[in-house]
Image (cartoon, rainbow, N blue to C red):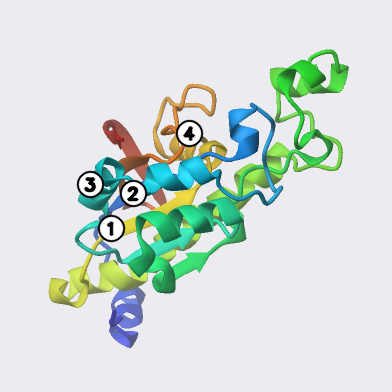
Amino acid sequence: MRGCGMDMDWRLSVGMAIPSIELELVLIRHGQTKWNVEHRYLGHTDLPLLPEASERLSQPQQQICMQTELSGGFWRVFCSDLLRCRETLAFVAPSLEQDAVYDQRLREMNFGAWEGCTYEQLKDNSLYRRWIDDPSKVTPPEGESWTAFDARLRSFLLDLGQAAVAAFGCCAIKEKKSEVTSNRVLVVTHGGVIRNLLAQLVPGLTFYSAVAPSPGNVMVLKILWQHGQWSADKAHILEKG
């Protein structure tokens, strides 16, 4: 995809406003792993998909559902670098693997010493109970703070916005829409990441009220870049699968 070069910088220097930019964000949650089925905390532990999860992603009905959303091309393709997401991308859209950016910021939260544990194993742990009540104030032992988790996803969204301005904003100013082949972005990631992104993008949603698609399914979200940030509307969220 061609950019618009220095013309954009010159126009910005004389105060020309960048128009709002709309993207269609296609969010795919990875398929199931052994720990997902066993309801164990799974963050940075790098497990593969279950064989049956791989089979499900390869079934014609699932392929038809996915291909509806995956057809038409993408401006950018992002994927968590963890194996379960890479395998999901390979099953649902092998032709996009070569275009994907495998970004560590799209990893699930790191649960540290609680990785691989179930609620039943942790429910009597006072630190765990405090974390459940308010994860912004408690960090799992050897794990990731809520501040760090939230910040890396804010960083991802900001970088996406800046790239969109560079690619779409200048072309819109110059009315050369043909220079942009698609305004769609594919992200293959984790349930917690999707909930965090929704909470950041949709006014009124929180991490706890946001709902991620079930494993191996897709959600489509229209997002708007204005005044240096992304936003979305609940009415523009569509889950499929």
Q: Distance between the residues labelled 3 and 4?
A: 29 Å
Q: Mark 1 points at which residue?
A: 184
Is 176 located above or below residue 55 in the figure? below
Position of residue 99 measured from the top left corner of the image (x, y, whole percent): 40, 72
Q: How far apart are marks 1 and 2 (CA)?
A: 7 Å
Labels 1, 3: front one: 3
Q: How far apart are marks 4 and 2 (CA)?
A: 16 Å
Q: Quadrant of residue 170?
A: bottom left
Q: In which quarter of the image is the C terminus?
A: top left
Position of residue 126 measured from the top left corner of the image (x, y, whole percent): 86, 16
Q: Name the residue under label 2.
A: 26
Classed neighbour count for the residue bearing mark 4: other residues with Cα under 10 Å, few (<14), some (14–19), many (≥20): some
Pointer 3 or 4: first along the chain: 3
Classed neighbour count for the residue bearing mark 2: other residues with Cα under 10 Å, few (<14), some (14–19), many (≥20): many
Q: Distance between the residues labelled 3 and 2?
A: 15 Å
Labels 3, 4: front one: 3
Q: Name the residue under label 3.
A: 64
Q: Which mark, residue 238?
A: none
Q: Which residue is drawn at 55% across and 43% down?
A: 50
Is 152 located above or below residue 18 in the figure? above
Q: Is mark 1 on a helix, strand or loop?
A: strand
Q: In front: 163, or 40?
A: 40
Q: Mark 4 points at which residue?
A: 199
Q: What residue type is labelled 3?
A: Ile
Q: What element carries label 2?
A: strand
Q: Are marks 1 and 2 in contact (CB under 8 Å)?
A: yes
On the question of residue 15 being in view, the answer is no
Q: Distance between the residues labelled 4 and 1?
A: 20 Å
Q: Is mark 4 on a helix, strand or loop?
A: helix
